[in-house]
Amino acid sequence: MTELELKYGCNPNQKPARIFMESGELPLEVLNGKPGYINFMDALNSWQLVKALKASTGLPAAASFKHVSPAGAALGLPLTEVERQIYFAPEGDLSPIACAYIRARGADRLCSFGDWAALSDVCDADTARFLALEVSDGVIAPGYTDEALAILQTKRKGGYNVVKIDPDYAPAPIERRNIFGITFEQGYNDFVIDETLLENLVTVNKDLPQQAKHDMLLSLITLKYTQSNSVCYVKDGMTIGVGAGQQSRIHCTRLAGSKADIWWLRQHPKVLSLQFVDGIRRPDRDNTIDIYISDEHDDVLADGVWQNTFKVKPEVLTQAEKAEWIAKQSGVTVGSDAFFPFGDNVERAFKSGVKYIAQPGGSIRDDQVIATADKHNMVMAFTGMRLFHH
């Protein structure tokens, strides 16, 4: 197939719409559903991310995409008991690729609502069963087991979007796009992100363990496929906060840091002990947890309201308790798609437990940024490579 007609483009008024190859066959096949224009933008960007992660780390990888940026990305590492609880994962053994998607989805469950899922490996039944429970628009993978495909074909009344992509497909070296009737042309960004980028450690502390290297690679590869400006917080092989599309670097850092704080607060004992009413829907549970953690907790704890969600009225999670808990976060990595222009980005990252930083370097204030990192005994690598994506 050289082209695939779409219902419409980014918006219903943008017709006609299609995806096509100027020569050769499309490297993908729609196995179920009818993906749209934005679906395919998410699918192709997210596939590049997980393919690069797998190549860089050797581990299965997954991503959860929304509006052409990742809400989460993760490696296929085993789930802890706390992770099983906060991500609503099933009991029992789970495959590495299922763990990867559960962790990617768990990074920011509110932003992952209605996501596009990407898998570096063949989608198996474990992954399909979890996907079937979540509000999701579609999935892309290099293949599907018969059992997995059968499960996914029952989702959304049989309309769930399932795309299979040729894992060996390589794009042309030149890419083009039209904006306002004008054609832009550039070389495809085939820059390889690997551990050689992490050799220029510019801080006094140069102790960079292997797990931190993997987290740096995960942050940088995630940034390569995130709308710029962007900053990404990572811990233990999964993103915990992605700040995308901000005009200011510090706003990226604050946005991503606040998401990392929320991820960590979801593990607070008071949150883990919340007793929800039977049969509550997963999105309602996610939204309620988010409100409970926020300063708007009165909205769900008011008399006559909490009974709709909780079996027992929870205690308030106070500002002091939240601050104390966030201060316990540690071992976090942060990546930036362009240099940090001021030390304020490092200071904000430190508040969310950041120990390791990967950024291009090249600011006229690099000395100030390095000094700020040294003040907090951080390890910072200058990669020398900007990763803008638009």
Image: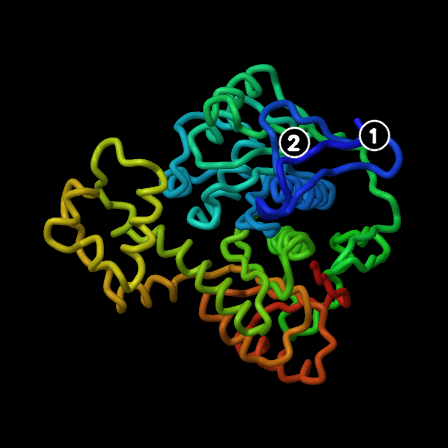
Q: Would you place residue 22 above or below residue 265 in this image?
A: above
Q: Would you place residue 40 above or below residue 131 in this image?
A: below
| Closer to the camera in the image, 176 or 309 | 176
Mark 2 lies on a secondary structure that is strand
Hey, what amino acid is under mark 1? Glu
Name which quarter of the figure residue 316 lies in: bottom left
Tell me if residue 370 can be seen: no
Q: Give residue 43's mark.
A: none
| Closer to the camera in the image, 190 or 11 | 11
Mark 1 lies on a secondary structure that is loop
Marks 2 and 1, how far apart in space? 18 Å
Hey, what amino acid is under mark 2? Ala
Q: Which residue is under mark 1?
A: 25
How many residues crowd mark 2 within 10 Å: few (<14), some (14–19), many (20+)?
Answer: many
Image-based side of 6 in relation to 99, left or right: right
Residue drawn at (81%, 60%) of the image: 182
Q: Would you place residue 201 above or below residue 87 in this image?
A: below
Q: Give residue 141's mark.
A: 2
Residue drawn at (48%, 20%) of the image: 154
Image-based side of 303 in relation to 110, left or right: left
How many residues crowd mark 1 within 10 Å: few (<14), some (14–19), many (20+)?
Answer: few
Residue drawn at (81%, 51%) of the image: 190
Question: In front of the other: label 2 or label 1?
Answer: 1
**x then y, percent, for residue 318:** 23, 64
